[in-house]
Image: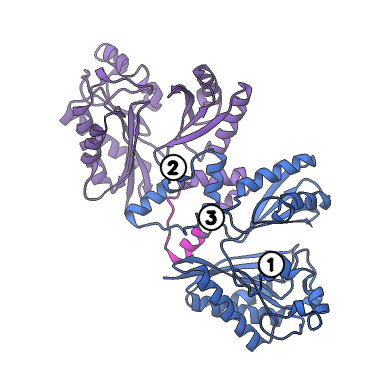
Chain colours: A blue, B purple
Amino acid sequence: MALVECVPNFSEGRRPEVVEAIVAAIRAEGVYLLDTQMDHDHNRSVVTFAGEPQPVVEAAFRAIETAARLIDLDAHVGQHPRMGAADVVPFVPLRDISLEACVELAHALGERVAAELDLPVYYYEAAALRPERRNLADVRRGGYEALKKELGSNPARVPDAGPSRVGQAGAVLIGARGPLIAFNAYLNTDNVEIARSIAASIRESGGGLPRLKALGLLVGGRAQVSMNVIDFRETGLFAIMEALRREAARHAVEITHTELVGLIPQAALLNTALEYLQLPLEVRSHTLENRLGEVTGDYREVPFR
Amino acid sequence: MALVECVPNFSEGRRPEVVEAIVAAIRAEGVYLLDTQMDHDHNRSVVTFAGEPQPVVEAAFRAIETAARLIDLDAHVGQHPRMGAADVVPFVPLRDISLEACVELAHALGERVAAELDLPVYYYEAAALRPERRNLADVRRGGYEALKKELGSNPARVPDAGPSRVGQAGAVLIGARGPLIAFNAYLNTDNVEIARSIAASIRESGGGLPRLKALGLLVGGRAQVSMNVIDFRETGLFAIMEALRREAARHAVEITHTELVGLIPQAALLNTALEYLQLPLEVRSHTLENRLGEVTGDYREVPFR
């Protein structure tokens, strides 16, 4: 059975009734709701669900329709960059489905969002139609406000599908990608400049770690390094944590705790443990569960290695 | 289905044909052979298998019989403490079975080994009949050589089952316990005294970490801290690795790499990652696999928390 994951992010993290309406729109036969996280400070929510391709795409469409109806970006305030009510809608291949197939799902959903909801759609990451739109941060630069100013006038803003005008629901960024990990580290300071400086030095765009994105934010009065780990198989959490601690020490601050947004593939945690413990990565397949699963068939891990 | 694990250790790590004969004796309908590790330096092998209680106990008996027939402790040399050809035979509850039920399996096996193989049997850990025999290290102190000298004369040596005399197969230590982790750290020195000093300061008996046993050995010309983590839920690999690195630094040496003997419960690696990453342990149940398993039923982890 093909299993695809969808992890839409919505620009609402303060009104539970709105998030509940979106989740209710996602619920359906054949759709496995895995996780919902509301973030009051970022005023943003992340829903994780999975299932076979068709019901998952249908659920994603209903969620976008509901968010566009209930969220007004002209009234939205929050730390996190965003361009739409349903801001980003990525598809992730879990089992028995390819990234290419997920790209097709993204494009099919985008066509339908453009045709039936009359919203501008941009494709990003593996689903991008233009190289300059692969990187989500580039597509979203300036957020909803910049899009409102430029859409219709700036040819670089012409959407991949849908109208070249924007309403209070903004635009929808639809993508296909591997298992991204959203990982935030809190510092024992309220000086956001330190978080920004640490973020700038560890992220790929600053010559830091490959496939790592990082921003410095002020969240609940605490400086936070907010990160997207695009491919933990290339840059894992161990390398990131070591870099964070090294940079924090340079600024004479400490990491008080960290948090994940959404779900994390087990392999990302197992790899972190093995690197920290100086064990060979082959031990990955040498856990009791993996061996039991191999011989009894009673355990399958999503094969993110 | 009740699932019990058995992890017998045999005093042979150099003659593959002997270990193969033991493994062949274990193989049977309803017995899942999970892992076999031969250690040339320790001249010792560890076999891990699991299944429903009855076939597992039967397989353990056949393995003890085979080892007793093929291994001569008068001819055995090796670093690791040992008292028998089939040296230790612990049962571990995995699923739908209690530790108490594993104690009964240990006693039933011991009675049979005493009656049919005429070998002295000692029960240890949860299967111990005397408090002073709970700790394996105490039961095994002085190894086969001391046992040969004292059995029959020293009343403290009277076995829990079987004869008070010892042949070249030695004695069998049969136990029931939770998920022990055998974890070894290699140092960048051939000075075994440093390994002994580090071991002495981190183990419980030296006032170190609870439920941690540690020895300093010279293995393949390298100083090695050889450890048994009796219950990783009490003292996990993160606390152990931090203690090892701190003590190594005090002796101006470094850990070059580590190794596991046998299989490790996934939870022990996941907990290590979460502690290292300063994430809350609740994230344990927040992996993609756990959530998928909960909603699809397509994944069960052995619940070592």
N-terminal of the two: label 3 or label 2? 2
Hey, what amino acid is under mark 2? Ile
- Helix, strand or loop for disc 2: loop
Let me know if residue B131 appears in the view: no
Residue A201 location in percent, x, y? Answer: 75, 49
Hey, what amino acid is under mark 3? Ser
Question: In the drawing, what numbered circle is on residue B264?
Answer: 2
Q: Which residue is mark 1?
A: A136
- Report the quarter where the N terminus of chain A lies: bottom left
Tell which tag, 3 or 1, sits nearer the viewer. 1
Q: Is residue B291 magenta?
A: yes
Q: Which residue is mark 3?
A: B285
Both marks 3 and 1 on one chain: no
Give the number of callouts. Answer: 3
Question: In the drawing, what numbered circle is on residue B21?
Answer: none
Label 2 neighbour load within 10 Å: few <14, some 14-19, many 20+:
many
Q: Quadrant of residue B254?
A: top right
